[in-house]
Amino acid sequence: MHIAAALQLRDSLLPSLRILESELSSKAQAFAHDVKIGRTHLMDAVPMTMGQAFDAFTRQISLAMERLEGVLPRICVLPQGGTAIGTGLNAPTRFDLAFCEAASELAGVTFTPNPCKFEGMAAHDALVELSGALNVVAVSLTKIANDIRFLGSGPRCGLGELIIPHDGLTSSIMPGKRNPTLAEVAVQAAFQVIGNHTTITMAGASGAFELNVAKPVLIYNVLQSIRVLADSIEIFARGLVRDLSVDSDRLASNVSNALLLATALNPVLGYDRVAAVTAKALHDGTTPRQAAIALGYLSGAEYDTLVDPVNMATPFSPST
């Protein structure tokens, strides 16, 4: 179980995650100057760049790889040589060392003997820990894929800020309708992994005294989770993320019309007056600039000096 999991991580899932990390990082750089409106509670917030959104995605995947690599040392500890219950009864002297040396040479992965064979045979906490890391990968993948497909919703009656590449598929009933199917594949694969983690957790908890007899269902689900994540992540990265682009006109329109640009006025006007600006703009169907001028709080030139979406999207440290 441990050897199979280690090999699948090394040869399948980690390479797929590196591909996704690279593609997301490329988009973070490509979209670095594309200002958009952030969203909290699904509602308009203050400006940021599309590159910053993709930088956050990239960081999630980087941390996912760190988590998996952090588990690997415990996956590479083997209980062979414990024989029946962990005592090593009837095993040749140094069998555990010889086994790990041979396995390491064959697999190209360094395996070491478990110093407590009883733990290695009665419990499978390392595999449950691995499943926990896979579960986090699934959660991250769901978040990233959903954000991308929601940002690309439309093309005319949704957010439409991202342009989803054509995957060659269209609706069977609505001619020419294109759907973010590869993002949907990634999300469904993540659902499978999240469900598998529950099974793995129960299997890991079912060790009774000196032996866990739920090994088959445990490793079946661990390996399935690795496989479906690896396959869906690579397809998602190469088939969707790689060819994503932004709709610059839509972004510019959304930014220019955003109410919460007025947040930059807080240090000058105070919270209550800025709230009056946004309320008036919303009520009148105007921009916050027009509302601030109408209320007599600022001139147009003063507003333009204070409210710059690009500057608002620039990271800053409160201590500087």
Image: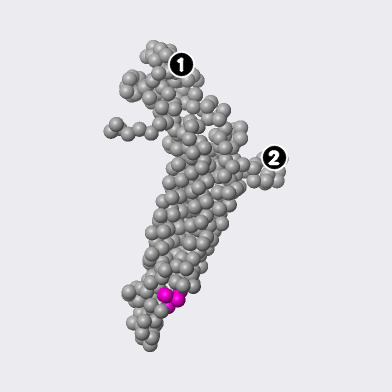
- Location of residue 216 in the rendering, given as x and y in whole percent from the top left corner: 49, 72
**One can see residue 147 in this view:** no
Q: Quadrant of residue 240?
A: top right
Within-10-Å neighbours for mark 2: few <14, some 14–19, many 20+: few
The residue sitting at 37% across, 74% down in the picture is: 113
Q: Is residue 107 visible?
A: yes
- Residue at image position (44%, 42%) is 56
Residue picked out by circle 1: 290
Residue at image coords 61%, 32%:
156
Furthest-bottom residue in view? 90
What residue is pinned by disc 2?
176
Please say if the residues under marks 2 and 1 sit with CB atoms less than 8 Å apart.
no
The three-letter code of the residue at mark 2 reads Gly
**51 or 253: nearer the eye?**
51
**Which of the two labelled residues, at mark 2 and mark 1, occupies the earlier sequence position?**
2
Residue 228 magenta: no
Q: Is residue 271 left or right of residue 238?
A: left
Q: Is residue 19 above or below residue 38?
A: below
Secondary structure under badge 1? helix
**Cα distance in 3D space between marks 2 and 1:** 40 Å
Please name the amino acid that badge 1 sits on. Gln
Eyeballing the image, is 167 above or below 132? above
Q: Secondary structure at mark 2?
A: loop
